[in-house]
Image (tube, rainbow, N blue to C red):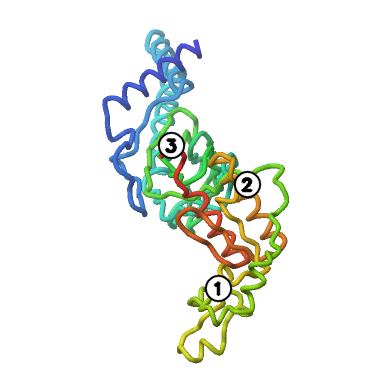
């Protein structure tokens, strides 16, 4: 019996989503903040709710057949409680406002921690659930203050990842009705590449004889460039900077140095994704060792630099590289 009711309910949901385009929210992504109102909140009875309605109907027939006033009163009271529970659940959803979405860092194959911020509410909103991806998270909003909810989002590949449709629902307070709505916020995040495990040691950063020969003639050969935020102070060429009225640094790419160079083209013989996974592993290893490094990619060069800014910039650039078939 329960399986039959569940199947009926599933078919009703599918029919409703086909017939009501607004129900599925397959429109363009919505700009934040997004607020739920009565025009985008939907209600259907749960399997338990259908059984409860059937029970009330049987009780009503029995009370009327036997002219049993107490039984009739009990049936009416239970029906009133059922109707009141619908409005209580609807009020928990109505006016819910999503104001901000942020995310942490993760690599492909891991769960991306997504942080959803809700606006202040004048009343307590209990028994709420949100479904993002294939994960459902239960939460409640206290009265008089905003709150952030953390929800994991599964990832399978590097690059940009949108949140997709997020379903908010509740069966509060009695579980008789499922009240839900869809949000499609305009938000996307960067998923870093998968890290090669185990990764080979970092490439040798020792200078070649030719680089050593050029190192002493940097200034004479014009090996200077404009200062970048990620450049360490020890590379600033103070005398040339004073003559040019701007900060200049010695170009370690031309002059040679002990900085580590992670070169995409140096990994010849590996396919594109394997190169990216190895470079990601080397970036993390160099950051853990507090090494200064430069990441050379087909269309850009990151660094030289060190620290969290250099690490995030490098991993982001690797994540956004086009795929082999693109």
Q: Nearer the viewer, residue 3 or 156?
A: 156
Residue 313 placement, left or right of 78: right
Q: Nearer the viewer, residue 245 or 217?
A: 217
Q: Position of residue 134 (x, y in %)?
A: 51, 33
Residue at image x 45%, y 15%?
Answer: 5
Q: Nearer the viewer, mark 3 or mark 1?
A: 1
Residue 251 tag number? 1
Q: Is residue 43 above or below residue 279?
A: above
Disc 1 is placed on an element classified as loop
Residue at image x 56%, y 48%?
Answer: 113
Q: Nearer the viewer, residue 232 or 263?
A: 263
Locate the C terminus by quadrant: top left
Residue 325 tag number? 3
Q: Are marks 3 and 1 in contact (CB under 8 Å)?
A: no
Closer to the chain start, of discs 2 and 3, is: 2
Q: Position of residue 156 (x, y in %)?
A: 53, 37
Q: Nearer the viewer, mark 2 or mark 1?
A: 1
Q: Are marks 2 and 1 in contact (CB under 8 Å)?
A: no
Closer to the chain start, of discs 3 and 1, is: 1
Residue 255 visible in the picture: yes
Residue 278 tag number? 2
Residue at image x 64%, y 79%?
Answer: 216
Give me the C-alpha separation between circle 3 and circle 1: 35 Å
Give me the C-alpha separation between circle 2 and circle 1: 26 Å
Disc 3 is placed on an element classified as loop
Structural crowding at the residue carrying mark 2, measured as other residues with C-alpha within 10 Å and reported as few (<14), some (14–19) or many (≥20):
many
């Amino acid at each position: 019996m329960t399986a039959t009711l569940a199947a009926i309910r599933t078919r009703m949901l599918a029919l409703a989503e086909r017939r009501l385009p607004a129900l599925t929210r397959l429109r363009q992504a919505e700009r934040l903040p997004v607020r739920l109102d009565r025009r985008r909140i939907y209600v259907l009875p749960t399997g338990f709710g259908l059984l409860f309605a059937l029970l009330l109907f049987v009780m009503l027939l029995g009370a009327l057949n036997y002219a049993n006033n107490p039984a009739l009163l009990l049936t009416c009271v239970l029906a009133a409680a059922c109707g009141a529970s619908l409005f209580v659940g609807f009020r928990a959803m109505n006016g819910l406002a999503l104001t901000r979405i942020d995310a942490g860092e993760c690599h492909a194959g891991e769960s991306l921690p997504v942080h959803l911020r809700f606006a202040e509410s004048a009343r307590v909103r209990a028994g709420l659930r949100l479904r993002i991806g294939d994960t459902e998270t239960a939460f409640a909003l206290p009265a008089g203050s905003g709150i952030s909810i953390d929800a994991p989002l599964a990832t399978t590949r590097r690059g940009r990842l949108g949140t997709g449709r997020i379903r908010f629902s509740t069966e509060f307070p009695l579980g008789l009705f499922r009240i839900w709505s869809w949000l499609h916020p305009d938000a996307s995040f960067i998923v870093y590449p998968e890290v090669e495990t185990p990764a080979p040691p970092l490439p040798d950063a020792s200078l070649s004889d030719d680089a050593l020969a050029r190192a002493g003639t940097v200034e004479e050969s014009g090996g200077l460039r404009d200062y970048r935020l990620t450049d360490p102070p020890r590379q600033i060429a103070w005398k040339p900077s004073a003559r040019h009225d701007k900060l200049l640094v010695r170009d370690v790419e031309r002059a040679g140095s002990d900085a580590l160079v992670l070169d995409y083209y140096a990994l010849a013989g590996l396919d594109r994704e394997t190169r990216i996974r190895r470079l990601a592993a080397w970036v993390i290893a160099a950051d853990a060792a507090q090494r200064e490094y430069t990441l050379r990619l087909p269309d850009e060069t990151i660094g030289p630099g060190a620290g969290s800014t250099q690490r995030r910039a490098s991993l982001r650039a690797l994540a956004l590289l086009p795929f082999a078939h693109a």
